Amino acid sequence: MSLIDDARAVRENAYVPYSKFKVGAALTSTSGAVYVGCNVENVAYPEGTCAEAGAIAAMVAGGDTAIADMTVIADSPKPVSPCGGCRQKIAEFAKGDVKVTLATMDGVVQETTVAALLPGSFDADYMSRV
Ligand code: THU
């Protein structure tokens, strides 16, 4: 199964009673393991979590901390764009050149990178004087 297939499959489990907008994410860690996540909403709206955050949490729980490849899919008119918070979360665990595939349920696919999604990102180097 490709990462797009994995993301498409887990998207079906999204818990989205409020937005009705299902998102699936799948990633391969540098160990070769695949981790998936879907968005999980909450009646207290800000407590909802994105699909990307779910996949990253699964990866860390599984003992991995480095993303090698990631895919996000939704039923959107153009390939779904990770929110700002998720871009920062992805950047925590991925080098800038890591490929991120954004996809629609219709089969439109856009490839980008972690660095392109979050240019000028804050990282630990900024704290080197501490
Ligand atoms: N959402 C994600 O899970 N990932 C994205 O990349 C964009 C937005 C979710 C959050 C919320 O549950 C729903 O989509 C609508 O914003």
Image: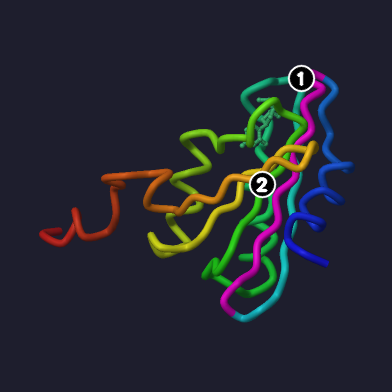
Mark number, residue 72: 2
From the viewer's perspective, tell me whether residue 99 is left or right of residue 63. left
Q: Is mark 2 within 8 Å of ligand 1?
A: yes
- Disc 2 vs disc 1: Cβ atoms closer than 8 Å? no
Please, is residue 47 above or below residue 63 in the view?
above
Amino acid of disc 2: Val
Please, is residue 96 above or below residue 86 in the view?
below
Q: Residue at x 87, y 51 (%)?
A: 9
Please, is residue 112 above or below residue 83 in the view?
below
Quick one: 104 or 98, which is closer to the camera? 104
From the viewer's perspective, tell me whether residue 29 is left or right of residue 6. left
Of labels 2 and 1, earlier in sequence is 1
How many other residues sit within 10 Å of disc 2, few (<14), some (14-19) or many (≥20)?
Answer: many
Q: Residue at x 88, y 43 (%)?
A: 13
Q: Spatial distance from mark 2 to mark 1, Cα to Cα?
A: 17 Å
Q: Residue at x 69, y 40 (%)?
A: 108
> Badge 1 is on which residue?
19
Amino acid of disc 1: Ser
From the viewer's perspective, tell me whether residue 124 is left or right of residue 63. left
Please, is residue 32 above or below residue 1 in the view?
below
Quick one: 104 or 12, which is closer to the camera? 104
Q: Quadrant of the C terminus?
A: bottom left
Q: Is mark 1 within 8 Å of ligand 1?
A: yes
Q: Which residues are magenta?
A: 18-30
For the residue labelled by badge 2, is the local secondary structure a helix, a strand or a loop? strand
Residue 101 % position (x, y):
60, 51
Q: Nearer the viewer, mark 2 or mark 1?
A: 2
Residue 105 counted in the magenta span: no
Residue 11 % position (x, y):
82, 43
